[in-house]
Amino acid sequence: MTENPQSKHTELPQSLGSATLPELEAMAEAKNLFLQKVIWVHHWTHGLFSFRVERPRSLRFRSGEFVMIGLKDGDKPLLRAYSIASPSWEEHLEFFSVKVREGPLTSRLQHLEVGNYIFISKKPVGTLILDALKPGKRLFMVATGTGLAPFLSVLRDPETHEKFDEIIITHTVREQEELAYRDFLETEIHDDEIFGELLKDRFTYYPTVTRGEFETKGRITNRIRSGDFAEDIKLADNRFNPETDRVMVCGSMAFNKEMAGLLQEHGLVEGHNNNPGTYVLERAFVG
Ligand code: A2P
């Protein structure tokens, strides 16, 4: 029998739980999951990476939503929530993940290679969606760590640009090297044929770094409180305006809690899918 040249891609290696493609297909079928091929992997740092899979043809999602993704773990799938980082019109799905040595899923997921397969749930969900926000003028997307992922999707949704005049993404990380997607947000998106024009003079990327030297140093919450943020991005006043400002928040539990408190002090009210408000939040998933 001649060897199938694809065969090395149809099995999950030991590091991902050793399985043949038919075994994975059977599990996906039994658990009502998509089984998708990995087409791109990029490691940002020793603790962060991104990857893309082929998009299931029937999957529809709203920018900012998340799905469950995972690997075979014995006789069942091991799944964790992951925000989709790619826009809803894109032909692939992109995810942004931490690598945790003891993490049940990410300790294995970090070994993904092009040609491997992962499970994806069929129903995307989440609250970081435009529908959960009342109409406004400025959209702030405030992230820590991998909480940036859903905003990479929302930023590239044409509806975002129809609904808002100005878009601001902030990304707070510990070390400067953890500013994943910095080149994309600082340069590449402005060179994009469509988004370059759409975002011209309307989009601000505001990275902050909490440990180590950086121009805009410190937690975003502290920079907002101190007035540094307002000064840096030339906001007319030092407050969020509940009439015109809308905020999406995605980060660690502690960060979300602190941001929510701050936004409430400014008079903003949390929105939900069936009851839009002036801010929405979701925890960045650990995976
Ligand atoms: P810090 O370095 O001061 O803890 P983590 O990796 O722990 O999730 O943190 C990601 C980034 O979010 C770090 O820069 C961290 O700052 C910041 N951060 C953590 N908790 C909060 C909070 N409650 N408010 C604002 N920023 C926070």
Image (tube, rainbow, N blue to C red):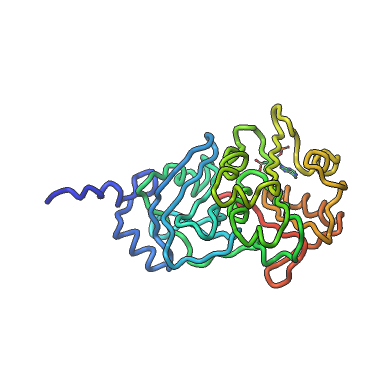
- To which quarter of the image does residue 130 belong? bottom right
- Looking at the image, is 248 positioned above or below residue 16? below
Residue situated in front as seen by the camera: 43 or 101: 43
Residue 90 in the image: x percent, y percent?
49, 57
Residue at 33 percent of width and 64 percent of height:
26
Foreground of the two, 198 or 257: 198
Q: Is residue 172 above or below residue 274?
A: above
In the rendered image, the residue lying farthest to the top is: 213
Q: Position of residue 191 (x, y in %)?
A: 56, 43
For ligand 1, the image quadrant comes to top right
The residue most toward the bottom is 274
- Residue 34 at x, y percent in the picture: 42, 63
Question: For the point 69% across and 66% down, which residue is it?
Answer: 132
The spot of residue 55 in percent (x, y) is: 44, 59
Name the residue nearer the viewer: 28 or 176: 176
Q: How many marks?
A: 0
The answer to whether any part of residue 30 appears in the image is yes
Q: Is residue 204 left or right of residue 117?
A: right
For this orientation, the residue located farthest to the left is 1
Residue 119 vertical position relative to residue 239 in the rendered view, above or below: below
Residue drawn at x 37%, y 45% is: 114
Q: Is residue 83 above or below residue 122?
A: above
Instruction: Compare residues 109 and 249 and report the one nearer the observer.
Output: 249
Residue 142 visible within the image: no
